[in-house]
Image (tube, grey):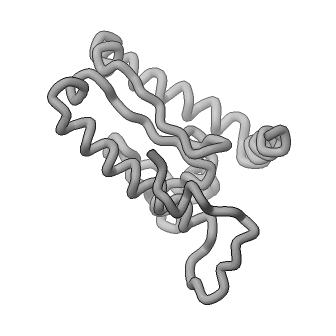
Amino acid sequence: AVPADSATHNDNDDDAGNDHNHDEWLFEDFNAWFEELEEAFWNDPIVGDHITLAPFHPDWKFAATATTTTTMDDGEDKNNNDSSSVVLGFEKKSPYPTVTLVCTSVIDQAGEAVTQQIASHNEKRLLHEGLERLQQLYQTIQEQQ
């Protein structure tokens, strides 16, 4: 299920009188919907312990891109003196709002060391590519939609 406002929204809709950024509003709706979905999964006795949800959105970015450090989902602080937080935000971007379902047992079997290794590899790769290259690639993907 998608929030009713997001499902019926059209970029050509008249937003006169609204004080919010259109893209930010869509992200906020998606994020609120995702939080409800995640809570429902956690509270479900059948799937709660077996499925991990991962959200992705075209407008996803770290919450504090204007400060000197940003706390990641895992609680680790990342240096934010330049565009690195914007670059790292591409890890959770997608052309469309998306939720990925991952078997929790796969994550558990891989272990913390492997999941940290994957995160480290992703970070290094994104930083290596750089903001301009990632923006070009993302723009190309969006144009092909």
Left or right: 64, with 51 as reference point? right
x 38%, y 34%: residue:
53
Question: Nearest the camera: 133 or 34?
Answer: 34
Relative image position of residue 77 (x, y in whole percent) = 39, 49
Relative image position of residue 105 (x, y in whole percent) = 29, 14
x 31%, y 25%: residue:
51
Q: Quadrant of residue 20?
A: bottom right
Question: Nearest the camera: 114 or 93?
Answer: 93
Residue at the bottom extreme, as displayed:
17
How many numbered marks does the figure carry?
A: 0
Q: Which quadrant of the figure contains the N terminus?
A: top left
Question: Nearest the camera: 106 or 72?
Answer: 106
Up the image or down, 106 lies above or below 144; here it is above
Q: Which quadrant of the figure contains the C terminus?
A: top right
Left or right: 136, with 41 as reference point? right
Relative image position of residue 97 (x, y in whole percent) = 56, 45
**Residue 75 in sight in this render:** yes
Up the image or down, 1 lies above or below 99; here it is below
x 46%, y 56%: residue:
3
Relative image position of residue 24 (x, y in whole percent) = 56, 66
**Residue 88 in sight in this render:** no
x 65%, y 79%: residue:
15
